[in-house]
Image (cartoon, helix red, strand yellow):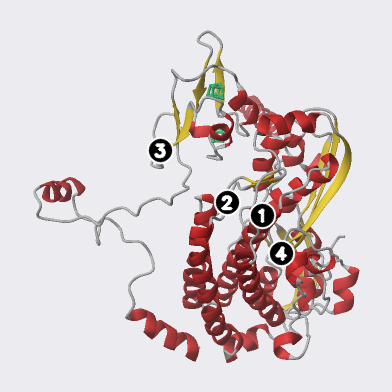
Amino acid sequence: MRLSRDKNSFKISVGPVHPALKEPIQLNCLIAGEKIKSVDFELSQAHRGIEWIATRRNPIQILYLAERICGICNICHTISFCTAVEKIAGIEVPARAQYVRTMGAELERIHSHLLWAGVAAHELGFDSAMHYTWKAREKVLDVIELLSGNRITKGIPTIGGVRRDFEEKNHAKIIEAVEYYRSVFGKLKAIFLDDPVIKSRTKDIGVLTKKDALTLCAVGPTARASGIARDVRQDEPYAAYPDFGLKAITPDQLTGEIKGDVFDRIVVRLLEVAQSADILEFCVKNMPGGKIVYEEKPIKLLAQLKGVHGEATGRLEAPRGEVFHYVKLVGEESPYSWKVKPPTYSNLLPWIPMLEGEQVADIPIIAASIDPCMSCCNRAVVAENNENVLNHDMLHRLSVEKTENIRGQLA
Amino acid sequence: MFEMAKELLRQLFKKPATNEFPAKHAPKSVLKLLEKVSKGKARLNPPIPVPEKFRGKIDYDRNKCIGCKLCIKVCPAAAVVFQEKERKIKYICSRCTFCAQCVDVCPVNALTLSNEFLIADYKRD
Ligand code: SF4
Ligand code: SF4
């Protein structure tokens, strides 16, 4: 899509590196006065060739590659990849491992949503609210440390289970964190949802109608805030979710109405923090015993995977929406193909109806409201208008030509 | 921001949530401060212990290693290289992602996890 200019409008570019966006993407907005008339964006500013690298690695090595697709929702990508491989090889994951995976994913959701709430507050200019939410986020990082030893990148799921356990001695600490988040939820609700300034900056701003959300295939909290009660954990429950019986969160559960604006997206994420706390409590109380991994010896596992053929998909609900992994194994050490579709990829097009008609000053909060994660969705680089791209050789040649020109003139 | 203002006031009377620096304020001279500490005239805040399952720098016991190359096979970051002549491995810390997969796989426990995390250096190995 190209933006067509007329003489009353200006084009402004936000990004790829811009203080209002924490991630590399270029938003081109056509504005008339303060109003945004139309929007276009250019993706793939941070292509890393992850899928290509994976075709040169074995599945155990890919676990850690998958983890690095995204900094925040790292466990979701690993579990998704594992699920796909497990389906191909017909590996059954022990019940306890399913619970540990669920807990890891829910801890991550709390962490991600609180981080987002802080960023949203910062974008609106409420830095004290940002620090307060980020302080609240520390608690969940402490619990993640109990499981993995690290704060963010966990390295816990493996094909056929998990590598470390949530031992019984740590359960009290998890329950303590659950209680803490229940108390913090009330405060966050008061800070974010009852404040008149935040309300007027976010209500009826960046509206995504249910129809637009459906046509543009929005996922996760972005779709749920527009009233689409879809959640992979509810529609196609995996891991421990069938036992919990999760219901997708929509904003009307708290406010009684669905508008699909930025405010509703805050509501959905805060409610999901409370829901995740409930899931964590459920998991701790109902944790089955037994093994945590199907095959303890990674080398044996690799040998088994080397003999299998087939393709499968793994999908699950990451904090930002549905993550989708496709894997094809052809009886070799490395997979023949691995395709990843992260949630932000689906949530970018909804930016267009959200931003159109809004003011330039609303770009940061609307852009942030889908909780974008750009480097996750950079799967390909398209070099358009190749003749206009000056590469190093061309530049060097131009420079040499100039020197020679000047030399000729001086001689 | 009435609710926030109340919360901020409450926070004023609480202990800081962040971990303490060794010294509250940056000293004019670190060496002098250390000297004072060694004489017992000043006190540093002790470091926070690492979590129980912390995965730090990998320790390698050359004598135990049988050169089976399993760690090389699973290492996602090519942080382990094989030394043909000695039939031993070399661990390159600057490439390591601290996933501990090599520790899990080593049949003779030649690789172990340490608590060491201060690994910034001017030299690569
Ligand atoms: S910890 Fe992981 S990255 Fe580091 S050497 Fe071992 S396997 Fe390689
Ligand atoms: S797995 Fe252990 S024994 Fe085998 S090469 Fe590596 S360090 Fe040596």
Report if the beta carbon of the residue with label 2 is closer than 8 angstroms to ligand 1: no
Q: Residue at x 52, y 81 (%)?
A: A183
User: Which three-letter amino acid code belongs to the residue tagged 4?
Assistant: Arg
* Same chain, labels 3 and 4: no
Kindly state the secondary structure of the residue where label 1 is placed. Answer: helix
Quadrant assignment, res A120? bottom right
Label whose residue precedes the other's in the sequence (2 or 4): 2
Label whose residue precedes the other's in the sequence (4 or 1): 1
Q: Position of residue B31 (x, y in %)?
A: 17, 45
Q: CA distance from mark 1 to mark 3?
A: 35 Å
* Residue indicated by mark 2: A165
User: Which three-letter amino acid code belongs to the residue tagged 1?
Assistant: Arg
Circle 3 crowding by C-alpha within 10 Å: few under 14, some 14–19, many from 20: few
Kindly state the secondary structure of the residue where label 4 is placed. Answer: loop
Q: Quadrant of ligand 1?
A: top right
Q: CA distance from mark 3 to mark 4?
A: 34 Å
* Residue indicated by mark 1: A96
Q: Is residue A141 visible?
A: no
Describe residue B46's horizontal placement relative to residue A201 as left or right: left
